[in-house]
Amino acid sequence: MKSVNGNEIIQVFESWSPKKYACMPNDPIGLAIGTLNKPVTKVLVTLDVTNEVVDEAIDNGCELIIAHHPPIFMKLSNLRTDNPKGALYEKCLKNDIAVYAAHTNLDVAPGGVNDLLADALQLENRKILEVSFEEKMMKLAVFVPVDDADALRDVLAKAGAGRLGHYEACSYTLEGKGRFRATEGADPAVGEIGELHIEEEEKVEVVFPQSMKNKILKAMLNNHPYEEPAYDLFTMDVDTNKQGLGRIGKLKQPMTLREFAQFVKVQLDVPCLRAVGPLEGVVQKVAVVGGDGNKYIRAAKFAGADVFVTGDIGFHMAQDAEVEGLSIIDPGHHVEKVMIKGVAEKMASLCADQKLPVEFIQSKINTEPFQFI
Ligand SMILES: [Zn+2]
């Protein structure tokens, strides 16, 4: 069986959750420990990298760990192996386990942590809570012989062109005739030197975010049958690729804050949670931010949320929210564990599409530091 290189796996991951989506200054994302330039057969997906998680990776024969929380968050001033963190890094290196972190870029990515939490809470008509990334869209129109058009459409879709919301491989095609005369020195795929040639062609149009321009053009040029492919490239003013942190949506049915708190406990699998606001008040519009959402209380209020679900809410932030009439449910930071199943399943499906034989294992280690007594 073809062996898969760690870099290939991360390329697939970053086509879904690119580093450009990171929305925290100097977020230490990417490869944190080891190398990706090696064969990888099994990947462990985890929220945190603890000693037990590294043991789990070793026991399962994983060569790579994909974690949400970066294992090296603060700059290191030494690499001593006689302290717990240093020993953890040593264990990874000695066992040839690479660790790759996807933090705020995975929060933001469509289908990432915030969407997974919104899925678990069954939020409908979902929108981004706070846009943190925006780029213009471009359109490529390329002229290709009819017989080669399907293959080229496929190449463009695989390179990531034609993604619109929940749709992929979107393109538009018009049929027409291409005319050209190859001159001395040309090596035409069709037609003869010195003769005007008419070819039945298709004009294939696809859109993509501006940052993908080089990748899409390279894919098109490398796979077009013509020596000199003809194409148009536009920057579009209408659509932009907007991504951001948090989600806001509606519950199918309104419920009291008390009922909603129970619902969150079940859906996010937590033994208890903290609630701010009138328990008999009715809520339907819900904002959610995975992890620590203290900074997004105002955004949730402005967006019209009845209740804001997030972790690590501070005492004074809770008081401020109460005064402003925004209810809060704090189920803890650890609910981000939804990413384990979400990322493992998404990556298994993306790698299967790319015919990369690699297994994604969901960590079973509980990394919640809090006990509830
Ligand atoms: Zn977090």
Image: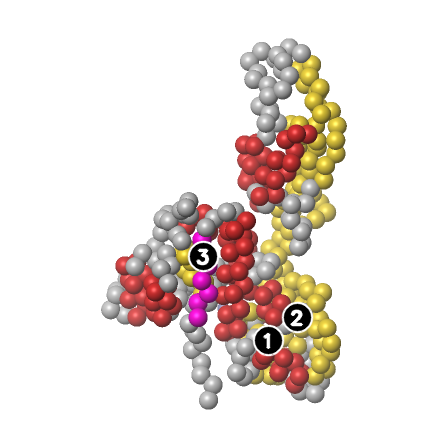
Magenta region, residue range? 358-364
Element carrying mark 3: strand
Residue with the mark numbered 3: 359
Q: Is residue 343 left or right of residue 275?
A: left
Q: Is residue 282 left or right of residue 345?
A: right
Question: Which residue is located at x 37 percent, y 49 percent?
Answer: 39
Residue with the mark numbered 2: 122
Q: Is residue 130 left or right of residue 333?
A: right
How far apart marks 3 and 2 lie (CA) works out to 28 Å
Question: Which residue is located at x 62 percent, y 53 percent?
Answer: 134
Rendering quarter of residue 323: bottom right
Which mark is first along the chain, 1 or 3? Answer: 1
Q: Nearer the viewer, residue 200 or 17?
A: 200
- Three-letter residue code for mark 1: Gln
Residue with the mark numbered 1: 267
Q: Is residue 359 magenta?
A: yes
How far apart marks 1 and 2 lie (CA) works out to 9 Å
Q: Position of residue 238 (x, y in %)?
A: 72, 47
Q: Position of residue 159 (x, y in %)?
A: 57, 43
**Looking at the image, do the residues carrying marks 1 and 2 touch, with CB atoms under 8 Å apart?**
yes
How far apart marks 3 and 1 lie (CA) works out to 27 Å
Rendering quarter of residue 85: bottom left
- Three-letter residue code for mark 2: Gln
Answer above or below: position of 368 versus 202.
below
